[in-house]
Amino acid sequence: MIATFAALMPCLPVCAAGDAAPGPAAPAASAAAAQRIEDFGVELVGVRLSGADFLIDLRYRVKDVAKAQALLERKIQPVLVNEATGDRFYVPQVPKVGSLRQSATAKQPAQLDKVYFMLFANPDRKLRAGEKVTLHAGDSMVKGLVVR
């Protein structure tokens, strides 16, 4: 698994603070005021390092299907930002598998009390356990998520 994921690393964008972001647009500086994760209609299950610390696994349980659409829409590209360093972490787009996150569609709508995941790339293992990150999803953001 590590060898397979390591082969993908060159194509995954991670930028230090101030660098231009390849791929999805960087979160806007004028983003809406910080929200709580519950404002998205979800309950945070955890933010953990996974895959020999090369992945950041964010899991959440849907409590309000209508509010959770902001996290489940395919068009929205979520970004995790390390609050201390400003490093940005993106959801990888793997050629044969696609985006490493779950999303809801018209054919497969979100389900109440189901746990969904997003996997973010952590190249060079820049993010460590105990650090705080901010989740940006569209115009919304959630600050103070602690990585376990």
Image: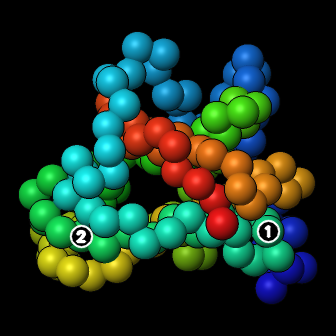
- Residue 128 in picture, x, y percent from top left: 79, 56
Residue at the image point whose x is 52% and y is 43% from the top: 144
On the image, numbered disc 1 is attached to which residue? 53
Q: Which is more toward the observer, 3 or 63?
A: 63
Amino acid tagged 2: Val
For the N terminus, the quadrant is bottom right
With respect to residue 108, does 136 lie above or below? above
Residue at the image point whose x is 39% and y is 36% from the top: 141
Could you tell whether 71 is left or right of 14 in the image? left
On the image, numbered disc 2 is attached to which residue? 62
Asked whether the viewer can see residue 73, the reply is no
Q: Counting other residues with Cα less than 10 Å from the Cα at mark 1, is it few (<14), some (14-19), or many (20 or more)?
A: some
- Residue 134 in picture, x, y percent from top left: 53, 41
Could you tell whether 147 is left or right of 137 in the image? right
Query: In which quadrant of the rendered view does residue 42 lie?
Result: bottom left
For the C terminus, the quadrant is bottom right
Q: Which is more toward the observer, 17 or 39?
A: 39
Amino acid tagged 1: Asp
